[in-house]
Amino acid sequence: MTTRRGFLRRSALSGAGGLLGSLPLARAAAPLTRSFAPQRLMNGEALQTQDFNGAGSLRVHAEARRLLTGCAVIPGKLRDDPEYASLVAAQANIVVPENALKWEQLRPAVGLFNFTEADAVVAFAAAHGQRVRGHTLCWHNQLPRWFASTATPENARQLLTEHIQRVAGRYAGRMHSWDVVNEAVDSENGRSDGLRNTPWLALLGDDYIEYAFKTAHAADPQALLTYNDFDIELDTPEQARKRAKILQLVRKLKARGTPIDALGIQSHLGTTEAPAGAGLRSFVRELRRLGLQVFITELDVNDRKADGLVPDRDQAVARVYAQYLGLMLAEPNVTAVLTWGITDRYTWVGNKDPRPDGTPPRPLPFGPDYRPAPAFFAVRDSFDARTLA
Ligand code: XIL
């Protein structure tokens, strides 16, 4: 029998159609002849005459290439900010709750689940023909306050099991994918398996990742199960070591028959780092050989260190988008591109490290005024350049 999971995996890896299933593909993309032309963005008239939220949207351009594209969303803003909600509806064929599916938000008390915000995102997506990613079932950050004083080696497996069953079970059949485990590798801590010292590792031992994937698969056999991590994009020695440890983990999981379908590469980038290159490319290719799709899960470009006025900063950000997506979308197993937010009005960038001049960061495809930034065109052009096998 062909399961949906198997079908999606095969069709994505072969580059054939079918990845988007029942998503509306009717709005055909207008043929795009122009290439990324930054100066165009200085011309308000050109901006107004283009239909960025219709035939010219990221969504339409992605669908023409059978790609998934979308962003992390904030349920409260979907409710209270109609312009934001329309932008998300127009630009995304997949969304992911930025925080609403984390333990901290879902479980105010050990026995109490609050699904209100996550349900709102799933309902919004259904209303707009969008898929949903779940983020995340097992992570060491954003655990509720009660966790540290409640979880013990005796009850931790039960806590995790119950969590995955309740949460993945609730949305079973409605999730495109789940980030089952997030950020579990730390190549620098001296362990030969590269696992990060987290409460989960301490409480459950080193098979907890495999266990989480198996439990998630049982709770939602249709969702594509993803391992998600960060700082694995660049050609630095440290990031190369982290990629190697992640490959080691994925090989082990595969060898043990663990249901893992995809690797999520967060892709929180910056304007002043050396660009991603050969290391990332061979990582993605190795994942393809192992039968995994790759999702770009949290893309944004921090312009904290970019010099100049806003137009210069925007160009620097757009150049990183163009270079990164050019590299990644040349690989057929890279099948989804999600940014961590859609408008610079709502971004986590800058929360920890604001720009020294105090001005707000501009890391996303749309500016704080919801107008497309140069990064939007970089993303769109990178979709157009994607070749279909
Ligand atoms: C971030 C959110 O964007 C913030 O709103 C929150 O305060 C902290 O978490 N890696 C991840 C995401 O996997 O869950 C993080 O999201 C960003 C880094």
Image (cartoon, helix red, strand yellow):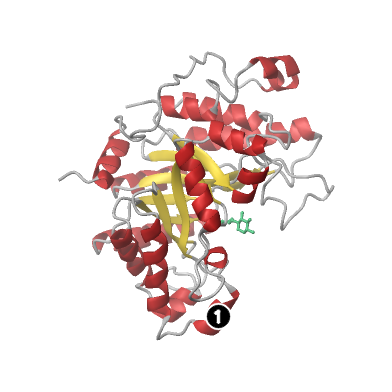
Q: Quadrant location of ligand 1?
A: bottom right
Residue 272 or residue 152, whichever sits in front: 152
Quadrant location of the N terminus in the rendered image: top left
160 left or right, relative to 87: left
Q: Is residue 334 visible?
A: yes
What element does badge 1 sit on? helix
Would residue 46 appear left or right of 379 to someone viewing this image?
right
Q: Quadrant of residue 315?
A: top right
Return the x and y of residue 69 as percentages of the image width and height.
48, 37
Residue found 61% across the figure and 30% down from its top: 376
Above or below residue 6? Residue 327 is above
Q: Work out which quarter of the rendered image holds the C terminus and state it.
A: top left
Q: Residue furthest left?
A: 1
Residue at x-position 69% and y-position 41%? 344
Give the image location of residue 336, x and y in percent.
44, 40
Regarding residue 273, the answer to whether it shows in the image is no
Residue, far right: 357
* Residue plotted at (48% across, 24% down): 384
Q: Nearer the viewer, residue 344 or 77?
A: 77
Q: Amino acid at mark 1?
A: Ala
In which image quadrant can residue 216 be found?
A: bottom left
Q: Tell me: is circle 1 under 8 Å from ligand 1.
A: no
Q: Position of residue 371 (x, y in %)?
A: 69, 29
Q: Residues within 10 Å of mark 1 (few under 14, many from 20)?
A: few
Question: How far from the left and from the top, in percent, is residue 46?
Answer: 69, 15
Left or right of 303 in this view: 244: left
Horizontal placement of 1 versus 329: left or right?
A: left
Q: Badge 1 is on which residue? A: 148
